[in-house]
Image (cartoon, rainbow, N blue to C red):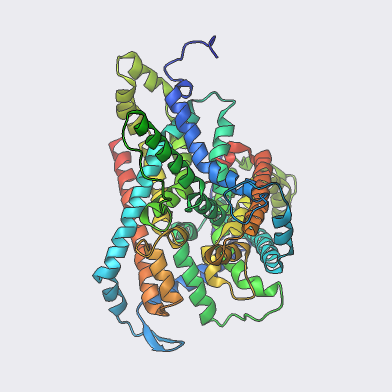
Amino acid sequence: MFTRTAIAPLEYTRKLWMRSWVGLTMLFLYAPLIVLMIFSFNDSKRNVMWKGFTLKYYEKALNNDSLVEAMVNSLTIAFLATIVSLVIGALAAVMLWRFRFPFKGLVEGTMSLPIIVPEICLGVAFLIFFAKVDWPTDLPWPLNLSAITIAHITFCFPFVAMVVRARLASFNNEEEEAAKDLGATEWQAFRDVLLPHIKPSLVAGALLAFTLSLDDFVITFFTSGPDTITFPVKVYSMVRFSVTPEVNAASTILIVLTVALTFVALKYQGVKGISDAH
Amino acid sequence: MSGPLQDWKSQKKPFAAVASAPVFWLALFFIAPMTIVWLYSFGQNAGPADIDISGTLDNYKRATEWLYLSIFLKSLAVAALTTLICLIIGFPVAMAITFVAPKWRPWLLLGIMLPFWTNLLIRTYALMALMGTNGYMNKGLGGLWEGASWLRTLVGMQPLEAWTPVQLLYNNFAVVLGLVYVHLPFMVLPLYSALDRLDKSLIEASLDLGAGHFKTFMQVVVPLAAPGIVAGVMITLIPALGAYLTPDLMGGTDSQMIANVIERQFKRANDWPFGAALSFLLIYAMFILIALQSMRSNKVKEVR
């Protein structure tokens, strides 16, 4: 500590005020989450005093059928929405990257709208839309999740398109031309040359879509019915009406899942790639 | 490098294969719903589940009544305050990420991004648990209070009255704090990417030529990072303006924002046309903000 070299002018991060500023910001960001995670193991109804380690709230959360059902619904929706968003988003990226066509600017602008339009407006739009077209609500599982899944795809696929398009910018077109010169068909060139190139962005886009879908509350709140509760909607009603430590336990499970997904994303894309995607 | 653009006419089949799904999805599941909302905003309730699109402007007229206008202005003020606080907290953090030793940089970035990937509802709930009357924030404040009381007895003054927990939640303060908590990563990431591109030798030159750190910061770093600041402000302001969850869970009766009013029209008040008009007013407000930003960035390009 005391034998260090002098602080160079640009080594701002070695200055004490800067370090404490960053430290306090991290404390602000993480303290609530860490306290929540610690107290999910607390053997007490009230969340303040540490009364000893227990797993009973995990047991309770996992035995709470409606909570588990909500979690299964959320994961199913996220899974389906990710697959469809991935296909549509990748196609949209290739379309915008490769072709010149009339009204291209308009299509491009419209595609970025689901990202910009406030969630509440999109939620309201889907509520009205599904009411207007009389979307059936009494379908068996998992078809009853179709309305929510459709809504999620609409706001997820533009993000996938954005990530994939950024990756396409580094594609060398000569590779594809070479493949075609050597006799590859349009489809073979796509599958064997372009697809491998954009694979990392597909993984990153899929993880982004999955988290966005799993995270969404507002849009789901407007499109879900009594039989199609998702995890955030369930937690919302639990938080509103009664705070139980079960919510802490269930939240901890989801946080751990998110952290695991983030590390998978990092492995594929690197930190920089992910921060660029946002 | 990016390949040369191909004209769609020379490649009709591949173009159709690629374009049909995204365009179809966008038209059916985005433009159609938005159009219906837009049409509804010119309608009126004709029955319990029947809306007559009569072309009336009454909904918009009602939205400009002071009751709703004030909520709109208040949402804007809350969002602007949130953005300002995020900028003040976030700028040094972004600078720290830029100037830290390279081996630490990914970890700091990850530290900012992880909460961003965590469920919004869980984060709000975690913050609420901390801020409740039995939460740690109140405990911390109580500790400070007792410390102050003890200091007073040291200098021979009367000790303070016993600490009573304060209500930190369910007011405007809680809403702003919650919004800052949720939106801070949105601000830091664009700031960092702007600062990262900045030519560090310019800062060194300014310091060598005798400007102090503060002067260098204000006259070199801030102007050069301006695009990142604008991007960060927009990316924070827009979602904060349309925030629903934070004011709903953490706010009191007087801290509703525009999104809560819209929600009420669709659930309790059951006045869909009016709710539709309010949502489109919110969308128009976003468009104005984005137009202002692009006008500004065009001007910057002309100057250069």
The residue depicted at 44 percent of the width and 66 percent of the height is A121
State the residue lying farthest toward the bottom: B47
In the rendered structure, the answer to whether residue B148 lies left or right of residue A162 reads: left
* Residue situated in front as seen by the camera: B298 or A119: A119
Q: Relative to residue A224, is residue B177 depicted above or below?
A: above
Where is residue B221 drawn, in percent x and y?
A: 36, 29
Where is residue A221 drawn, in percent x and y?
A: 54, 68
Q: What is the number of callouts on the image?
A: 0
Q: Is residue B294 visible?
A: no
Which quadrant of the figure has residue A209?
bottom right
Where is residue A206 drawn, in percent x and y?
A: 65, 52
Q: Is residue B299 visible?
A: yes
Where is residue B286 drawn, in percent x and y?
A: 37, 58
In the rendered structure, the answer to whether residue B303 lies left or right of residue B10 reads: left
Which quadrant of the figure has residue A176?
top right
Q: Relative to residue B41, is residue B189 depicted above or below?
A: above
Q: Quadrant of the N terminus of chain A?
A: top right
In the rendered structure, the answer to whether residue A75 lies left or right of residue B291 reads: right
The residue depicted at 42 percent of the width and 52 percent of the height is B168
* Residue situated in front as seen by the camera: A80 or A235: A235
The residue depicted at 52 percent of the width and 71 percent of the height is A222
